[in-house]
Image (tube, rainbow, N blue to C red):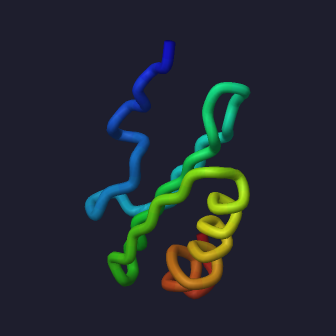
Amino acid sequence: MRRKMPADLYPTEDKPGLRVRGGTKYSSSQGDYVCGGCGAEDHANGDNNVKALVQDYADNHGPAHRGGRQ
């Protein structure tokens, strides 16, 4: 039985950030982000796509808009 993720773990415009969920034997990994600097958002499924999403967020969004500070 799959449990639904609590809504407060997902990034929103009011709570920007990055969320990554590792895959299991029965599901693929997932990731989401909402950038607090420019408002960009994205979603990915699967290990390679989630890795690319995290790299995009790190390079172009969240930390990049804070001058590298986290």
- In the image, what residue occupies the spot 60% across and 67% down? 53
Quarter of the image where one finds residue 21: top right
Eyeballing the image, is 19 above or below 7? Answer: below
Q: How many marks?
A: 0
Where residue 1 appears, as percent x and y from the top left, is: 50, 12
Where residue 23 appears, as percent x and y from the top left, is: 67, 37
- Residue 7 as seen in the image, left or right of residue 28: left
- In the image, what residue occupies the spot 32% across and 57% down? 12
- Residue 58 as seen in the image, left or right of residue 5: right
- Residue 38 as seen in the image, left or right of residue 1: left
Single out the residue that lies furthest toward the top.
Answer: 1
Where residue 30 appears, as percent x and y from the top left, is: 56, 47
- In the image, what residue occupies the spot 51% across and 74% down? 62
Where residue 40 appears, as percent x and y from the top left, is: 38, 76
Single out the residue that lies furthest toward the left.
Answer: 14
- In the image, what residue occupies the spot 51% across and 79% down? 61
Eyeballing the image, is 9 above or below 70? Answer: above
Eyeballing the image, is 29 above or below 40? Answer: above
Point out the image quarter for the C terminus.
Answer: bottom right
Q: Return the residue nearer the eye: 10 or 50.
A: 50
